[in-house]
Amino acid sequence: MLMKRGFADLPLHGGKAPRWLFERMKNLSREIIVYYVSEFGTQAFLERISDPFWFQSLGCILGFDWHSSGLTTTVTGAIKEAIKEVGSDLGLFVAGGKGKTALKTPQEILEISDREGLNADRLIYASKMAAKVDNSAVQDGFQIYHHVIIFNKDGSWAVVQQGMNEKTGYARRYHWYSKKLQSFVLEPHTAICSDWKGRVLNMVAEGSKEVQDISVELARENPKNLEKEFRKILYLKMPTSHPIGLSDLKPESLRKVLLTTYEIQPKNYEALLGIKGVGPKTVRALALLSELIYGKSPSYEDPAKFSFAHGGKDRYPYPVDLEVYDKTIEILSRAVRSAKIERQEKEKALKRIFRFTEKL
């Protein structure tokens, strides 16, 4: 079962995981994943990876700092490399990564889907919408710079992505899981991990549903009418400390995007959010118009979990013990091979029984 939502400190740490540690993280994560999937299946693994407590604990088992933003990028990187070697056999795949690699996620999904015969369109859509929601619909001051989607042959998926706030020096991690998802734009996350909680524009909260509907109606309006209303609001010289903020909202820059929404006539908020060009500023402008013209306010509720087994890369609480680490990999690897032999023997026995009953 998934843990309750919570938060954890994730301070930004610079540098990279040393090669000697990353290679072991890859090997150990491969043995853990193979063993877990062989026992419980890929669906159970996707559910676990979307649990922030389980994910954080996995990072600590692999020898990474529990409180570091680097845990997210390095653990998902190790998982990606580990699964790459056994993905087709397991029926489990990973796309995406950090920075420029995150931008290649759709292409990676397409390549894997072509090879494995999967539905790429649904997976690409899920990947893009998860990123769009956390960048535009949840305006918490964290910019997404890391995005990974893990999926199986059935088309189920989990997304783990992370945003950075350079001013505060902290990161925020967002977890998604397809089987728990009722809507991309209504309480879609399994959890959001962050140290900082404050007053943010949360357009995917239950309390923002009315504002979502009004935003869709406004997006269907002729942009000339909206621009007039928006200029009236600016003329009031409202303070820039307003929760939504007016300082960087310009009617001229919104006109082009609103013309696109007017031509497309989105049927709902998910469709509106999915339109190319509809970003944080458009979302804020529509929410502002909803609040000041119709008196409907969006939610400002912030939607924002450890253990050590092998030490940490920064020698806290103690240095990584390489002998113990390698022994763990060896034991798990032996257990996986043993379990595989047992299953093969059971399958052979069942086949012998089947052939015997056929003769009878």
Image (spheres, rainbow, N blue to C red):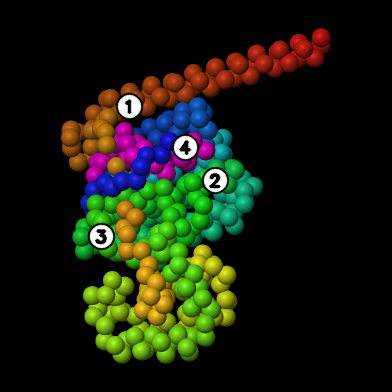
- The amino acid type found where label 4 is placed reads Phe
Residue ID for mark 1? 326
Q: What main secondary structure does the magenta stretch of the protein show?
A: helix
Q: Dot 4 corresponds to which residue?
A: 45
Task: Point out the tag, 2 or 4, that comes first from the N-terminus.
Answer: 4
Tag 1: Cα neighbours inside 10 Å, few (<14), some, or many (≥20)? few
Magenta residues span 43-68
From the top left corner, tell me how far across and down residue 236 is, in percent.
29, 88
Amino acid type, label 3: Gly
Measured as percent of width and height from the top left, residue 192 is found at 35, 51
Quarter of the view holding residue 312: top left
Up the image or down, 165 lies above or below 213; here it is above
Q: How many neighbours does mark 2 have within 10 angstroms: few (below 14), some (14-19), or many (20 or more)?
A: some
Identify residue type, mark 2: Ser
| Inter-mark Cα distance, 2 to 1 | 33 Å
For residue 156, the mark is: 2
- Where is mark 3, residue-wise? 198
Q: Quick check: can you spot residue 22?
A: no
Q: Are marks 1 and 4 in contact (CB under 8 Å)?
A: no
Q: Are marks 4 and 3 in contact (CB under 8 Å)?
A: no
Query: Between disc 2 and disc 3, whose residue precedes?
Result: 2
Q: Residue at x 41, y 64 (%)?
A: 208
Mark 4 or mark 3, which has the lower sequence index? 4
Q: Amino acid at mark 1?
A: Asp
Residue in the picture at 25% in, 49% down: 10
Which disc, if any, is residue 99? none
- Kindly report the distance in space between the C-alpha atoms of the residues bearing marks 4 and 3: 32 Å
